[in-house]
Image (cartoon, rainbow, N blue to C red):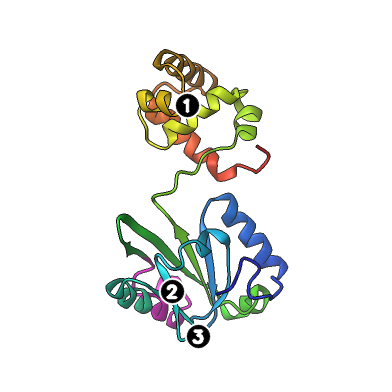
Amino acid sequence: MKQDAGLGLRRSLLTQIMFRIFKAMNCGCILLDQSKRVVHLNRLAQSAFGDTFTIKHSRVCATDSMSDTLFQTMLDQALKFEDRSKNPGRQTLGLKRIHKRPLIVRVVPFEPEARPHIDDAALALVVVDPEDCPEPSYAVLQEVFGITKSEARVGNRLTCGVSLQEAAEVIGVTIGTVRSQTKSLFAKTGTNRQAELVRLLTRLSLISDERD
């Protein structure tokens, strides 16, 4: 299994930049070579190994046998048709997991001329876990909207799909406090409904940083 640094192989500059972007987007990323062997992967993708992915005969596979049949076909099609517009097969797949929603994988092929610049990777697998709850960092919320830490805690709980009552219980405050802070969030972000606020905070999670 390749670690985050990639089996001791130094990442190219372009690969490093690409992985920083995927990390900021809270997405896993697995780079595969022409033989479907792992070139590099980030930590988010690495956490899916054993649960959703495994390595067989040095190649990446889905642990669920039915999912793997579709998964291997998707990879083979992507390798055969480098031009995505000419690929007749699927490019996105939900890999089955036990007691969890399927892990979503999108395959993106690289043109042959680009591969030497990304450590000879032929494919990128973009991995999205619907069980994750990406939260915008306090630093981003404070800088953009002047949101306080207590308001950020409420906003982040709402982003994860909990009710006001559940947010109050998790944070350890009264429901009245949560309602008051939610109204303040509406005012500061220019939103009017909880769904609108959640949509905005979810988008901000894509550009969050690690200063908290």
Q: Which residue is mark 3?
A: 35
Graded by Cα atoms within 10 Å as few (under 14), some (14 to 19) or many (20 or more), the crowding at tag 2 reads some
Q: Earlier in the sequence, mark 1 or mark 3?
A: 3
Q: Which residue is mark 1?
A: 171
In the drawing, does residue 131 fall left or right of residue 42? left
- Identify which residue is drawn at 53% across, 51% down: 26
Give the tally of numbered discs.
3
The image position of residue 148, as x and y in percent, is 60, 22
Is residue 158 placed above or below 148 in the rendered structure?
below
- The magenta stretch is 74-92
Circle 2/circle 3 CB separation < 8 Å: no
- Identify which residue is drawn at 51% across, 55% down: 27
Q: Indicate the quadrant where residue 211 lies.
A: top right
Q: Which residue is mark 2?
A: 54
- Identify which residue is drawn at 48% across, 81% down: 36
Disc 3 marks which amino acid?
Ser
Q: For marks 2 and 3, give the CA distance.
A: 15 Å
Q: Earlier in the sequence, mark 2 or mark 3?
A: 3
Disc 1 marks which amino acid?
Ile
Is residue 18 placed above or below 173 in the rendered structure?
below
